[in-house]
Amino acid sequence: MDLKFQAKNPVPSGASVGALAGGGGVQLRFARWAATQGPRRGTICLLHGRGEFIEKYFETIADLRRRGFAVATFDWRGQGGSARLLDNPRKGHCLSFDEHEADLTRFMKDVVLPDCPPPYFALAHSMGGNILLRHASRPGTWFERAILLAPMIALADAKVGIPQPLAQLYAEIGCLAGFAGSYVYGGTDAAEESCSFDGNTLTSDRERWSRNKAIVEVAPDLGLGSPTLGWLRAAYRSMTWIGSADYAYGVRIPMLIFAASEDTIVSTRAIEHFGVKLKAGQHILIPGARHEILQERDIHRQRFWSAFDAYLGVSALVA
């Protein structure tokens, strides 16, 4: 397994890339990097959102390494450079987020703990935030602290388009009827990054949008289409669990959660309600940002990095 690159998105130097066996032997692509500057602060475990891939985070990886962090990351099963789960590799599919949790455990035990310096911190976006929150209520966590960006605690009403209880019922019935591997209504093979910038729901930064679109054009195998009914059912079941009234009180990891004020993918209100209940955590709203805060304009990213640096004690300015 390798990493794809282009002139405007080079692979950060010193990458160690490989494959590990997730649950059921599913092959997962991983990559890790050492810090480029001191003092050494430990390792950031970077957990992506649905449909994302390692190459999309090269800029963020470089930003973290300059702050003294080693970085380790991997592609979730069914997306990026990891093994796809259906005959149509464009379908974003899974049957349970338990599978993702098991893959996170394997990644930590096989890649991070043996070869990456402690302490360990998690940086998770969207679906990755959902999976991290599942882990965060269990005993024996590896992470000293966690930073979540637009975690998928609940979907935004604008994303679903119909009452959410009806959407969840639709997913449950569709899977019971044997259509777990079928696209959700209106789903296609088209990757989100292949759409036009105008009207996109992910970022207001045209340059970063164009960069991510170019990655999929150069390496179309990294692209992922719409989710399946199986994925939607699994997502709703997981969101119902972590979004329950008392779940946040049981979170064991201190965490900093970011929400984007213009997010139409996940519910900003749900993030804020969750953040208020945390025993050891806080939440920050990034005004004007869309769903992908790390792919946003510099003004929004700078707000994130200022809070990140304060939270993890990065005192020196980073060029």
Image: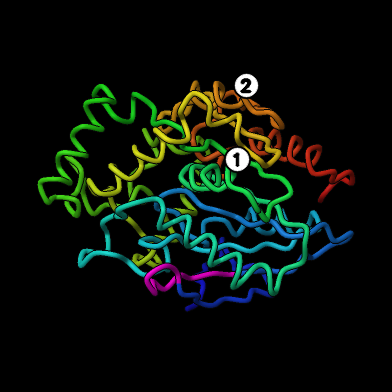
The structure residue drawn at horizontal position 33% and vertical position 30%, both measured from the top left corner, is 159
User: Hey, what amino acid is under mark 2?
Assistant: Val
In the image, is 182 to the left or to the right of 281? Answer: left
In the image, is 296 to the left or to the right of 65? Answer: left
Residue 87 drawn above or below residue 148: below
Residue 276: which numbered mark, if any? 2
Q: How many residues crowd around disc 2 within 10 Å: few (fewer than 14), some, or many (20 or more)?
A: some
The structure residue drawn at horizontal position 55% and vertical position 48%, both measured from the top left corner, is 135
- Classify mark 2: helix, strand or loop: helix
Instruction: Tell me which segment is drawn in magenta.
Output: 22-31
The quadrant holding residue 76 is bottom left
Residue found at the very far left of the displayed protein: 177
Q: Residue 280's x, y, as percent?
A: 72, 32
Q: Residue 255's x, y, as percent?
A: 68, 38
Q: How many residues crowd around disc 1 within 10 Å: few (fewer than 14), some, or many (20 or more)?
A: many
| Front one among 108 and 160 | 108
Name the residue that disc number 1 marks: 148
- Classify mark 1: helix, strand or loop: strand
Q: Nearer the viewer, mark 2 or mark 1?
A: 2
Q: Residue 84's x, y, as percent?
A: 32, 66
The quadrant holding residue 236 is top left
In the image, is 182 to the left or to the right of 103? Answer: left
The structure residue drawn at horizontal position 60% and vertical position 34%, both measured from the top left corner, is 250
In the image, is 180 to the left or to the right of 124? Answer: left
User: Hey, what amino acid is under mark 1?
Assistant: Leu
The verdict on residue 27 being magenta is yes
